[in-house]
Amino acid sequence: MKLRDKVLIVEDEQSISNFISTVLNANDYDTITASTGEEAMSMITSHCPDLIILDLGLPDMDGLDILRDVRSWSNLPVIVVSARTREHDKVEALDLGADDYIEKPFGTSELLARIRTAIRHTRTPLANGGIAQSGKFSVGALTVDYDKHHVLVDGADAHLTLNEFKIVALLGKYAGKVLTYDYMIREIWGPKAKADNQILRVNMANIRRKLEKNPAEPEYIFTEIGVGYRMRDTDE
Ligand code: CA
């Protein structure tokens, strides 16, 4: 028998909680639910879920406080599902270590795809952190070759500069996940880098010219406006 992943749904709106439970149960996940922050905190330690779906607006605390607490001791995947749509809220959640951020209302296939991605990342051992990685990442006609340090489109070298390669390599490593501008700048230019978003945007424009058929409608690297970038995942 296949071992089912257990998802903790932290949501105070009963109808949304029921909806998510129903969708997940129909797709082979076990679910447990909490409607307050306090309940969530105790269930996280007593039930050891494989993933948490976290609403931010809870009656007794801010979901970000739960995220902060979980991240202080664990890399358990957390997907924030929230009605807050300001860029600042997204950036804050992602910077605190949320694996993903989904705005309400959301579609079921989007939710399921993001859950699969978040769970898979915790099961994929990553070498050395940073962008050190071996092997290849492929999606569509795009291949990132981590050993040879180049990116191929339809089998042809895209001739990326070193920084362009680092950006694509980093996004490929976390395909499906939104990486914030700050996170990317720290990973690529170092923790003390004076780089700003502008330098990323310039690099991204060049990358898209080299990788995308139509840079204005990218197929591989998507912009999450005001937040960061996301590489298309293999199963998208
Ligand atoms: Ca709520």
Image (cartoon, rainbow, N blue to C red):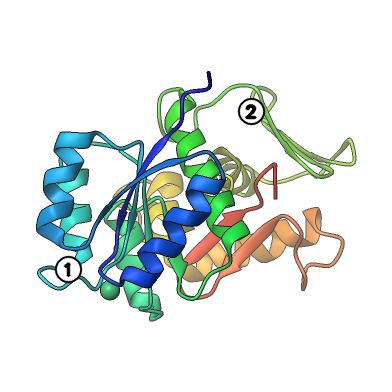
Quarter of the image where one finds residue 72: top left
The structure residue drawn at horizontal position 49% and vertical position 28%, both measured from the top left corner, is 132
For disc 1, the neighbor class at 10 Å (few under 14, some 14 to 19, many from 20) is some
**Label 2: element kind:** loop
Q: Earlier in the sequence, mark 1 or mark 2?
A: 1
For disc 2, the neighbor class at 10 Å (few under 14, some 14 to 19, many from 20) is many
Mark 1–mark 2 distance (CA, rounded to whole Å): 40 Å
Percent from the top left, x then y, of residue 86?
Answer: 38, 81
Q: Amino acid at mark 1?
A: Asp
State the mark number for residue 146: 2
State the mark number for residue 62: 1
Viewer-proximal residue among 198 and 30 = 30
The structure residue drawn at horizontal position 68% and vertical position 66%, both measured from the top left corner, is 205
**Label 1: element kind:** loop
For ligand 1, the image quadrant comes to: bottom left
Percent from the top left, x then y, of residue 198?
Answer: 51, 71
State the mark number for residue 30: none
Residue 73 visible in rendering: no
Asked if ligand 1 lies within 8 A of label 1, the reply is no
